[in-house]
Image (tube, rainbow, N blue to C red):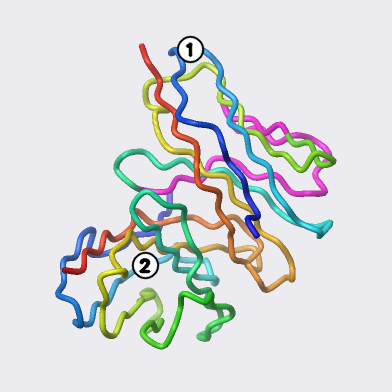
Amino acid sequence: EPEVTQTPSHQVTQMGQEVILRCVPISNHLYFYWYRQILGQKVEFLVSFYNNEISEKSEIFDDQFSVERPDGSNFTLKIRSTKLEDSAMYFCASSGLGGMGTQYFGPGTRLLVL
Amino acid sequence: AQKITQTQPGMFVQEKEAVTLDCTYDTSDQSYGLFWYKQPSSGEMIFLIYQGSYDEQNATEGRYSLNFQKARKSANLVISASQLGDSAMYFCAMREPPYGNNRLAFGKGNQVVVIP
């Protein structure tokens, strides 16, 4: 069964450093998403991406964040200068069916900013 | 304003028993989608079941069923014949128009512990 994969599973970084989180969406999906979950809190939407551009972003997704689809399979989230409050689980998701389909989530990357 | 409300405290359920997880939502749109996801202690988010607002029948998926009451704006998840592996957090989520806006809004989750 196809699934979304994410790397790395865990990342520890120093405040102010750049991190890149990687995702490989399900191969025939065209809509991609990033969500985050701060420990013990609910899952929050960050950004959606379609046709090589951002289709929607939340107020959390400020200038420190960027997304890219560098090739035909990967989808990345970059945080330019990490802050302590960026520590969270970051989930990638993808969907088909014109974007209205179910979003399937990857296993997440747990980011810890020290 | 909070769109998805899950207020139950942590729940203990006996193995093989059924459990109902409450979810109420807030929207003024007629067209929307409701989802339930499971998050075990390992952290991944696993899709369980989907209900569209225009679906006349309650969704079912194996041991999962959704008790959809549109007038009450509730979409409760029922897990029948609980298994030890059902111990997890369960999140209700909603997707609203406008189409092209595919973001999911999540509730805070319900913790379920299945005891033998």
Residue shown at the point (50%, 74%) measured from the top left: A47
Residue A112 percent location from the top left of the image: 21, 64
Residue shown at the point (52%, 86%) measured from the top left: A53
Quarter of the view holding residue A14: bottom left
**Residue B16: image tag:** 1
Verify whether residue B54 appears in magenta.
yes
Q: Secondary structure at mark 1?
A: loop
Give the labeled residue for mark 2: A24
Q: Are marks 1 and 2 on the same chain?
A: no
From this view, report whether residue B116 is shown above or below residue A37.
Answer: above
Verify whether residue A15 appears in magenta.
no
Query: Which span of residues is magenta-colored?
Result: B44-67
Q: Secondary structure at mark 2?
A: strand
Q: Is residue B27 left or right of residue A34?
A: right
CA distance for labels 1 and 2: 37 Å
Q: Residues within 10 Å of mark 1 (few under 14, many from 20)?
A: some
Q: Amino acid at mark 1?
A: Lys
Near-viewer residue (A50 or A91): A91
From this view, report whether residue B33 is shown above or below residue B51.
Answer: below
The quarter of the image holding the C terminus of chain A is: bottom left
Q: Label 2 near label 1: C-beta < 8 Å?
A: no
Residue A1 percent location from the top left of the image: 43, 48
Q: Chain of mark 2?
A: A
Quarter of the view holding residue A71: bottom left
Q: Amino acid at mark 2?
A: Val
Residue shown at the point (65%, 34%) measured from the top left: B76
Q: Residues within 10 Å of mark 2 (few under 14, many from 20)?
A: many
Residue shown at the point (49%, 31%) measured from the top left: B9
